[in-house]
Image: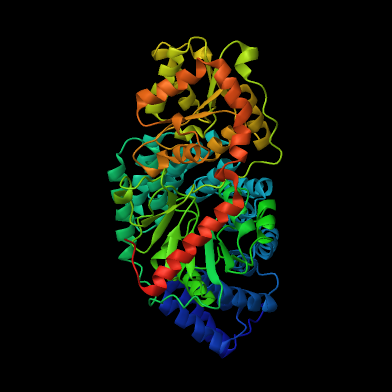
């Protein structure tokens, strides 16, 4: 028996044709024309679920997550079981910064379409952003099963493995993505940034330059390259500075600043300070920021935090209690964030990232605040012509030494650019280990990525000058790198058994290691910051080599601040001499160890109130100059 097919209503039939046209236009990149067809289709049939869902996808592609979410919700009112509508709603919620709601919608989409590759990938990405690593891995692995030749899923899995410190798997995933599609800039970018983190400078720079060639307008790739170059000893400081300036020029030509705004008169009001960072979480920047935030004078300053990360942790929760206005901004475009900064009337906008991960430096090119400052997270220039100042000190950036390496004016704090906060759970300082071991133990517990060929050569000289001494280093996650290190010492006549490698560990266990260390050896050209403070607090003197760039002078800054400039070397020979002299005088070393924590405790390095007052005075002075229209001498 033949079944009769009812003809569609005229409005619906017209809508179907318009939706088909709109989808075809969207696929060819004609977004405006596609949007017009979707609008026409919805004028004829306002409840057309296909039009609502596909239009939502188009709006999501253009960055309008809120409008996309509204359309997807309308589609689900008409057709609650439409998997694609749950999918686009989930993506829109995530893009708008509502991860929990987005994940819930994506889970419903997966339940409705268990074999939908794109939904599995998007759910895996959202769970990754929410720090739900195990759940994320399960969905990403399923996506890989569904589409093993997808470069995208290998990139995302690589990101997950990297966060879990499964570095060999992460490198393999990124390299597989490059094999599958060498045109994807993100695959080269992620590979390069991981190689930089693991100490393969040459491999990192090559991969990042390839990524930049494929996507020259992606700021994060530029930043990753500049960070890798700052860690490397391959280029002199002037050339690295030139690369930073090239970044600034490139994006200055593409980003039009907001209409300039003058600083309002200061009388009778609080100065508004806005900190922009992705690191208001369990991160070293948060450790150094906490003393300042805790001691800001709330009668004189109104503090804002613009937080550019997708998830919170215990550190985030604590910092929220110290900040009047805590504003998550990951969902905001650069233009939206700049307008929010302008709307809040921020007087001084402070970048805490520099060229580290998840920075928002393009916002500073929009010049939303009258005064813009960079500090703490990156010990060098941003390269931006719109960044007015960089906070530093006279030892990290000696007058007449590094000005030419900056686009910013250097503003030197009176003591140090650092305020070290000792860990409350740090163990007591143990007696000198050499007295019980019968030999001196040198150590560098810095990130292995900071260990350059030059500094390795100096460590060899130290071991040769102090027979029987041992060296303790942090193990690299790269097997190839470990083989290179062991071969380096052996090829220079140092028994590899004199060099011990320890795996990265919890903060408490890491601090306990210092009770087995007699003398700490700083890295170069990128010196230690946190590790230097930790070492000094644990009673271990640090020998550092001050170089020509700001990145190499953190140790010099801290040692000067605690009154021990004699441990700062200006030449490689002086570095070796300082280390060997300490090791050859155990009574002096024991006395120094016993007194070092008290020395640090009594110094400006840990005086949070003094540090906060110095930073606040800098802010006031900069503001007064801006109001007066004055310039620095």
Quadrant where the image shows the N terminus: bottom right
**Tag count in the figure?**
0
The answer to whether any part of residue 265 appears in the image is: yes
Along the viewing direction, whichever of 516 and 228 lies nearer the viewer: 516
Task: Residue at 55%, 30% (x, y): give it.
Answer: 445
The answer to whether any part of residue 182 appears in the image is: no
Task: Residue at 40%, 68% (x, y): give it.
Answer: 625
Quadrant where the image shows the C terminus: bottom left
* 226 up-or-down from 276: above or below: above
| Residue 134: % across, % down | 68, 45
| Residue 299: % across, % down | 62, 69
| Residue 217: % across, % down | 36, 59
Instruction: Determine whether, in the image, residue 250 is placed left or right of residue 498.
Output: left
| Residue 478: % across, % down | 50, 30
Task: Residue at 35%, 40% (x, y): give it.
Answer: 206
* 100 up-or-down from 434: above or below: below
Along the viewing direction, whichever of 329 and 39 lies nearer the viewer: 329
């Amino acid at each position: 028996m033949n079944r009769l097919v009812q003809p569609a209503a005229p409005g619906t039939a017209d809508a179907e044709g318009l939706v088909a046209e709109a989808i075809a236009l969207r696929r060819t990149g004609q977004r405006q024309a596609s949007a017009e067809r979707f609008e026409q289709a919805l004028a004829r049939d306002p409840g057309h679920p296909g039009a609502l869902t596909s239009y939502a996808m188009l709006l999501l592609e253009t960055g309008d997550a809120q409008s996309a979410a509204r359309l997807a919700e309308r589609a689900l009112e008409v057709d609650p079981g439409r998997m694609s509508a749950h999918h686009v709603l989930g993506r829109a919620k995530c893009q708008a910064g509502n991860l929990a709601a987005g994940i819930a919608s994506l889970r419903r989409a997966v339940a409705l379409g268990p074999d939908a590759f794109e939904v599995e990938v998007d759910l895996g990405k959202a769970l990754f952003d929410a720090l739900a690593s195990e759940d994320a891995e399960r969905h990403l692995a399923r996506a890989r099963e569904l589409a093993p030749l997808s470069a995208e899923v290998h990139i995302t899995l690589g990101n997950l493995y990297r966060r879990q410190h499964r570095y060999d798997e992460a490198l393999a995933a990124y390299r597989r993505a490059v094999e599958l599609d060498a045109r994807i800039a993100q695959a080269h970018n992620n590979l390069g940034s991981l190689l930089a983190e693991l100490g393969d400078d040459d491999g990192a720079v090559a991969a990042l330059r390839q990524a930049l060639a494929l996507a020259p307008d992606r700021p994060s790739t530029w930043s990753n390259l500049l960070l890798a170059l700052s860690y490397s000893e391959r280029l002199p400081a002037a050339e690295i500075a030139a690369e930073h300036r090239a970044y600034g020029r490139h994006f200055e030509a593409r980003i039009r600043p907001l209409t300039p705004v003058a600083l309002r008169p200061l009388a009778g009001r609080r100065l508004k300070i806005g900190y922009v960072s992705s690191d208001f979480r369990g991160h070293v920047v948060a450790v150094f920021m906490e003393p300042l935030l805790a001691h800001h004078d709330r009668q004189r300053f109104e503090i804002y935090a613009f937080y550019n990360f997708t998830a919170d942790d215990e550190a985030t929760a604590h910092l929220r209690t110290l900040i009047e206005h805590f504003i998550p901004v990951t969902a905001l475009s650069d233009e939206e964030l700049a307008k929010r900064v302008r709307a809040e009337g921020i007087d001084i906008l402070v970048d805490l990232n520099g060229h580290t991960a998840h920075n928002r430096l393009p916002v500073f090119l929009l010049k939303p605040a009258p005064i813009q400052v960079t500090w703490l997270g990156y010990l060098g220039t941003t390269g931006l012509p719109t960044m007015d100042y960089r906070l530093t000190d006279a030892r990290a950036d000696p007058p007449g030494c590094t000005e030419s390496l900056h686009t910013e004016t250097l503003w030197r704090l009176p003591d140090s650019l650092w305020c070290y906060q000792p860990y409350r759970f740090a163990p007591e300082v143990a007696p000198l280990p050499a007295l019980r071991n019968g030999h001196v133990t040198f150590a560098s517990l810095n990130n292995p990525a900071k260990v350059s060929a030059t500094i390795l050569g100096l460590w060899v000289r130290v071991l040769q000058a102090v027979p029987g001494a041992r060296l303790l280093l942090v193990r690299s996650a790269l097997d190839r790198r470990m083989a290179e290190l062991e071969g380096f010492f052996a090829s220079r006549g140092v028994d590899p058994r004199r060099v011990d490698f320890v795996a990265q560990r919890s903060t408490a266990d890491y601090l306990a290691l210092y009770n087995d260390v007699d003398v700490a050896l700083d890295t170069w050209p990128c010196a230690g910051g946190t590790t230097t403070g930790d070492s000094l607090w644990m009673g271990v003197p640090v020998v550092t080599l001050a170089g020509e760039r700001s990145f190499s002078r953190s140790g010099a800054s801290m040692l000067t601040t605690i009154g021990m400039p004699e441990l700062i070397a200006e030449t490689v020979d002086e570095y070796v001499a300082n280390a060997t002299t300490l090791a050859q005088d155990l009574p002096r070393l024991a006395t120094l160890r016993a007194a070092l924590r008290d020395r640090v405790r009594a110094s400006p390095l840990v005086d949070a109130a003094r540090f906060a007052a110095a930073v606040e005075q800098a802010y006031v002075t900069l503001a007064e100059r801006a109001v007066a229209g004055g310039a620095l001498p």
